[in-house]
Amino acid sequence: MKPLIVASVLLLAACAGGGAGAPPPERGPTIVSLNPCTDAILAEVAAPGQLLAISHYSKDPRASSMEAAVAARFEATGGTVEEVLALDPDVVVAGSFLAPATRAALAELGMEVVTFDIAADVAASKEQIRDLAALAGDTPAGARLIARIDAALAAAAPADGESVATLLWQPGGIVAGEQTLVSDLLVRTGFANAAPARGLSQADYIALEDVVAAPPEVLLIAGGELGQSHPVLGRLGDMHRARFDTSLLYCGGPTIIRAAERLAAIRAAAS
């Protein structure tokens, strides 16, 4: 081989190898999430291997806001200090209701603890996405998720611009108040939360008799109480009735996309 060619090959090999002194690629902190809502967002914005575990709620179809296939990719923890310590994360992400004793114990063990409130509307959920993506070290991933949410909400917005009076009947027979994420989603997808007009606020109870006496235009049933499946509801001819999965009620992030799609389908059927 000619000397010039040998020199070129050696130079290319050195460049490809990066050299013995090249710094390793920057890596975000390892994370354990103890909250089902942050579970779903972190599963979208964290790098492979960065999210060490999610909450056990996300493994339970009755409490999860994640697709089962997504939740299956991660270990789960019950949230005890011992379980988290065994995973040895850099950061623990939890809800604002984390027990003070648990938070103090985790901090004493050298783990950063970051808590998040329940998002009260879409804007608050977007802010959480930005914060969690920044925490994970991938701000662009957060921006991509927000763009998907914006696209889903735009697609779900009613073409006629009108609002349909709707009562969302949740587990336990309670209704959703105005200052909730799901109420914001109702407005954005062509519904008007009928609870305030009835003098009801967040988590107020409504009986079957009250629904039958003054049926809303649309009744969304997200619970499994006896009254919520009573045959009399099927005889209210001017009322459209539809199921709304409980997994879509409380969390933001990617859950907004599925909720918007479901609400758009219900709005189209009700029209």
Image: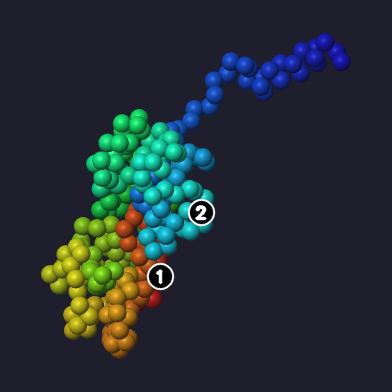
Q: Nearer the viewer, residue 150 or 68?
A: 68
Categorize mark 2 by other alpha carbons within 10 Å: few (<14), some (14-19), many (20+).
few
Residue 12, quarter of the rendered image? top right
Q: Position of residue 162 (x, y in %)?
A: 28, 69
- Which disc, if any, is residue 246? none
Residue at 25% in and 40% down = 101
Q: Is residue 230 left or right of residue 203?
A: right
Secondary structure at badge 2 equals loop
Q: Nearer the viewer, residue 225 or 22?
A: 225
The amino acid at mark 2 is Ala
- Which disc, if any, is residue 265? 1
Q: Position of residue 175 (x, y in %)?
A: 23, 68
Residue at 68% in and 18% down = 14
Residue at 29% in and 64% down = 186
Give the spatial CA distance, label 1 vs label 2.
28 Å
Q: Quadrant of the C terminus?
A: bottom left
Sequence-wise, the earlier of marks 1 and 2 is 2
Q: Which residue position holds label 2?
A: 72
Q: Quadrant of the N terminus?
A: top right
Secondary structure at badge 1 equals helix
Q: Is residue 4 left or right of residue 190?
A: right
The amino acid at mark 1 is Ala
